[in-house]
Image (spheres, helix red, strand yellow):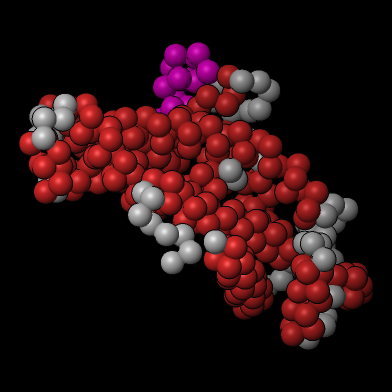
Amino acid sequence: MGKYVLKRFGLMIVTLWVVATITFFLMHALPGDPLTTDKGLTPEARANLEEKYGLNKPLISQYGIYMNNLLHGDLGISLRYKTRTVNSMLMNGLPASAKVGFLGSIIGISIGIVMGIIAALNNKKFLDYFVIFIVVLGVSVPGFVFASVYQYFFGVKLRVLPVAGWEGIKYMILPIASLATFFIATFARFTKTSMLEIMGSDYIETAKSKGLSNTTVIFKHVLRNASIPIITFLGPSLATSVVGSFVIESIFGVPGIGQFFVTSVQQYDYTMILGTTLFTSALVIVGYFISDMLYGVADPRIRIDK
């Protein structure tokens, strides 16, 4: 077990290095630079800023400096918010993003799993078709469309919820609902598919032939075995949801990490783009690691060390 954890930790570090390297060189391959958007810069001022931020150095030198700082946990200074570090901006925006993302995913996953179970137990009946309709709608329609619909219906027409802002619990409802919609559809589909596959297995028929009740068969055998593919998607989903949805945050004016990422892309803020990309990637990698650990809990036959 210890050897496995160390091996996975090493792979996590290598993966983050690959992500950072690819993102770094891809950003510098784009036309323009962080100073392009400053139209009023004189040649002298531009030269001074390039010297200050090391933009006049060879690309490989810039890469080496960034990697050295990264090893010390320093993500650099934002090239747009010139008096703030990327570390402090991420920590300031994380609480709001985590609230929306975590609550949205937990609510969505819980409802989605329940709907998937209902659909599987009522296969080819009205409840199943209703769940399929929700799944198709939730997967095919982008989240920002649902966000706009929720804003119009609950904020403009009914006027029961604010359309944007971040001043209390009621401001969290629509962003959370918008994010939860995707998780409801996704996990309802996963749960139904996994359960139907398990319910058609020979050992389920054997369990029924032994006189076990349907409740015992469903909860002890079907759900436990059907949870394996669900766990595969569960870890990364929870991890990425911590930073919420960048687009949804922008729509509802949530003061989270999303606002920094959107503006950093628009303003060629290299350090902020790298910081948010690495932060999100680290969460996803940790999510997959947690999923691997949960496999052994769901099914003791799975040996983590193998």
Give the vertical position of 276 relative to 41 (above or below). above
Is 73 in front, or is 75? Answer: 73
Q: Is 149 covered by the magenta stretch?
A: yes
Which residue lies at the image location 40% right of the left edge and 39% below the top edge? 183
Is 238 in front, or is 231? Answer: 231
User: How far across and how far down the image is residue 133, in percent?
Assistant: 22, 35
> Does residue 29 show up?
yes
Q: Locate the C terminus and report the quarter of the image it occupies.
A: bottom left
Displayed quadrant of residue 254:
top right
* Helix, strand or loop for the magenta stretch, by majority: helix
> Does residue 27 show up?
no
Q: Locate residue 5 relative to residue 301 in the image: left or right.
A: right
Give the vertical position of 143 relative to 65 (above or below). above
Which residue lies at the image location 18% right of the left edge and 48% below the top edge? 197
Q: Locate the N terminus and report the quarter of the image it occupies.
A: bottom right
Which residue lies at the image location 71% right of the left edge and 65% below the top edge? 270
Q: Locate residue 161 relative to residue 190 in the image: left or right.
A: right
Q: Is 43 covered by the magenta stretch?
A: no
User: How far across and how far down the image is residue 29, in percent?
Assistant: 62, 78
User: How far across and how far down the image is residue 82, in percent?
Assistant: 85, 56
Give the vertical position of 187 relative to 103 (above or below). below
Q: Locate residue 251 relative to residue 302 in the image: left or right.
A: right
Residue bounds of the magenta highlight: 146-161
User: How far across and how far down the image is residue 53, in percent?
Assistant: 85, 70
